[in-house]
Image (cartoon, helix red, strand yellow):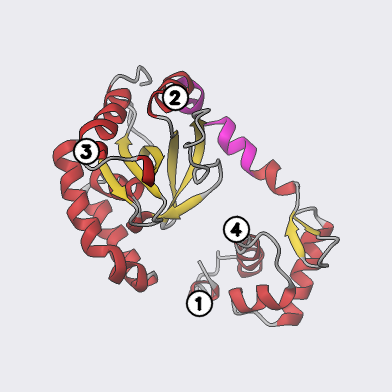
Amino acid sequence: MGEMDVKSRGGDRQFATTLARGLEILRCFTPERPVLGNRELADLTGLSKPTISRFSYTLTELGYLRVDRTSGKYQLGTAVLTLSYPLLANIPLRQVVRPQMRELAERLGGSVSLCMRERLKLVYVETSRSRSLRAQRYSDIGMSHPIIATANGRAYLAACTAEERTTLLNEIRVKTPDHWLKWGAAAEEMMAFCQDNGFAYSHGEYRPDVATVGVPYRPATGGELYVFNCVLASYAVKPGQLEREVGPALLAMVTDLSYV
């Protein structure tokens, strides 16, 4: 939700615009841009620089931002961790699947992760990484990637109900039309593949140095739809290996889960 989205909620009397803007400022910080100044935050949010200055001062006083001593700009503060930890602690699936994830990561020489949806992205909430030098570091906890562009996201879309999938795809078309133009056709093709085979895959499509497989998973008791993901270095993956070896191996792990 950017500034345009916040403005569109102006008629909603229950919607706290000031709170929404403060949270959007925090969302501007990513692994690719961990340090931002007031001018950059103003450009990213569409808010005026004086407004950003008040928000950044308040967020710093509360511990959600801190000042980078080298640049004088802002970074996320440790108070952000106190918000995210309760969420992670209340996903029991993370603890249950760690042994299986660790074993498969070592066997395949990559990383195996658990993902959840956050708006139009999937975010990593658990990761086991092989000790192999080929293991990729693009799946650390908290990292996120666009649903439409990745094997993870396409596996998620394939496992949604028809109504959920239509709603989400329409949202992607409207809010990220550039993503849809670039990846929409390939995503629809891979969704169909996943529905037939139980997994989706991508070899260097989103990142040229990464090959990935995604398998959707919903506990037997219902509730949250998750995606398990395997990441490998693309240069180490042989033609057909994702379809014949990695995908079936990850699917077998997910199928055998005892979590209900």
* Amino acid type shown at disc 3: Glu
The label number, if any, that marks residue 135 in the structure image: none
Under circle 1, the secondary element is: helix
Q: Is residue 99 visible?
A: yes
C-alpha gap between disc 1 and disc 4: 20 Å
Q: Earlier in the sequence, mark 2 or mark 4?
A: 4
* Amino acid type shown at disc 2: Glu
Between circles 2 and 4, the one closer to the viewer is: 2
Under circle 2, the secondary element is: helix
Image coordinates for residue 169, horizontal then vertical, percent = 28, 61
Residue beneath disc 4: 30
Q: Earlier in the sequence, mark 1 or mark 4?
A: 1
- Say if mark 1 contacts mark 4, CB within 8 Å: no
Q: Which quarter of the figure has residue 260?
A: top left
Q: Earlier in the sequence, mark 4 or mark 3?
A: 4
Between circles 2 and 1, the one closer to the viewer is: 2
Residue beneath disc 2: 106
Q: Which range of residues does the magenta coloring cover?
A: 84-96
The correct choice, above or below, for 76 with respect to 57 in the image is above
C-alpha gap between disc 2 and disc 1: 45 Å
Front residue of 182 and 44: 182
Image coordinates for residue 49, horizontal then vertical, percent = 72, 81
C-alpha gap between disc 2 and disc 4: 28 Å
Residue drawn at x 56%, y 45% is 142
The label number, if any, that marks residue 4 in the structure image: 1
Between circles 4 and 3, the one closer to the viewer is: 3
Residue beneath disc 3: 243
C-alpha gap between disc 3 and disc 1: 41 Å
Front residue of 26 and 192: 192
